[in-house]
Image (tube, helix red, strand yellow):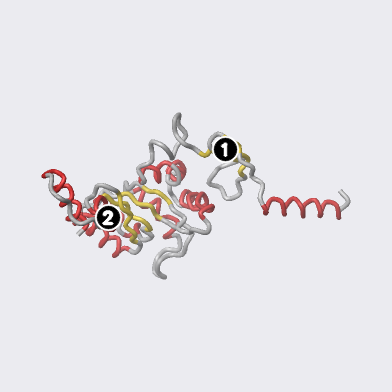
């Protein structure tokens, strides 16, 4: 319906006729239904992924698969479709009791080896800060480290069509620069500096204040 709405609007404009009655929903959906803008298709288990691939092909959508937790089971089908994926969470349990214990950990690596463009998502609105840890675990289970880093930086920007502005450090791009004392993907690595729009950001927070308070208190009690 949205596709036809968009076609009629273009046809009316071309012929100088009145367009169809304005519909906010169809007007917003039309460019996505016509493959002019990218859509996210959420599919996690293997069968749903196969249904999603069929749907995307039949409707001729510009799509990215989201979730894809059982992508490792149908990696060849995803590769054949030419679609990219944003997969995650990595830090989760296997989908079924018959799957290997490391199914979720190794899923990004399996998809990458199949030749699929992979981004990693935390799939946790409350703990997006753990995204580097998800990528780190994916790297520990076979995803090349540079690909793991790219999976949470440049690749997501590419999938959103924002790679000219975001995703990597290059002249003219917008970037938040993070300086650490070790590997960014290691959970134990400390962030030393953060620069947003070229300005250094204060890193202290309630947790760091409590740490310093009780650390000093402990040292006083120990007579140091």
- Left or right for 179, reference 35: right
Q: Secondary structure at mark 1?
A: strand
Give the mark nearest the N terminus, 1 or 2.
2
Q: Dot 1 surroundings within 10 Å: few (below 14), some, or many (20 or more)?
A: some
What residue is shown at x 13% (from left), y 48% (from top)?
A: 17
Depth check, mark 1 against mark 2: the one in front is 2
What residue is shown at x 74% (from left), y 50% (from top)?
A: 212
When the figure is inspected, residue 155 is found, relative to residue 199, above or below; the finding is below
Distance from the alpha carbon under mark 1 to that under mark 2: 37 Å
Which is more toward the observer, 36 or 77?
A: 36
Residue bearing the label numbered 1: 195
Which is more toward the observer, 70 or 203?
A: 203
Quarter the N terminus occupies: bottom left
- Left or right for 172, reference 203: left
What residue is shown at x 32% (from left), y 60% (from top)?
A: 73
Give x and y (percent) for residue 197: 53, 36
Q: Dot 2 surroundings within 10 Å: few (below 14), some, or many (20 or more)?
A: some
Give x and y (percent) for residue 88: 42, 56
In the rendered image, the residue lying farthest to the top is 171
What residue is shown at x 81% (from left), y 54% (from top)?
A: 217
Residue bearing the label numbered 2: 29
């Amino acid at each position: 319906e949205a596709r036809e709405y968009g076609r009629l609007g273009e046809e009316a404009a071309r012929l100088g006729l009145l367009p169809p009655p304005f519909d906010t929903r169809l007007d917003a959906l039309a460019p996505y239904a016509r493959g002019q803008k990218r859509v996210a298709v959420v599919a996690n288990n293997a069968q749903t992924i196969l249904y999603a691939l069929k749907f995307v092909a039949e409707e001729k959508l510009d799509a990215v698969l989201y979730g894809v937790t059982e992508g490792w089971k149908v990696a060849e089908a995803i590769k054949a479709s030419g679609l990219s994926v944003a997969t995650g969470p990595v830090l989760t349990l296997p989908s079924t009791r018959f799957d290997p214990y490391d199914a979720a950990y190794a899923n990004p690596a399996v998809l990458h080896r199949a030749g699929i463009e992979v981004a990693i998502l935390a799939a946790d609105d409350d703990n997006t800060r753990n995204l580097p840890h998800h990528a780190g675990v994916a790297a520990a289970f076979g995803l090349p480290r540079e690909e793991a880093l790219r999976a949470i930086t440049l690749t997501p920007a590419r999938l959103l069509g924002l790679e000219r502005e975001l995703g990597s450090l290059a002249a003219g791009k917008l970037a938040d620069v993070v300086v650490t004392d070790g590997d960014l993907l290691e959970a134990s690595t400390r962030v030393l500096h953060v620069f947003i729009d070229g300005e250094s950001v204060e890193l202290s927070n309630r947790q760091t204040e409590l740490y310093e308070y009780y650390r000093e208190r402990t040292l006083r009690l120990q007579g140091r």
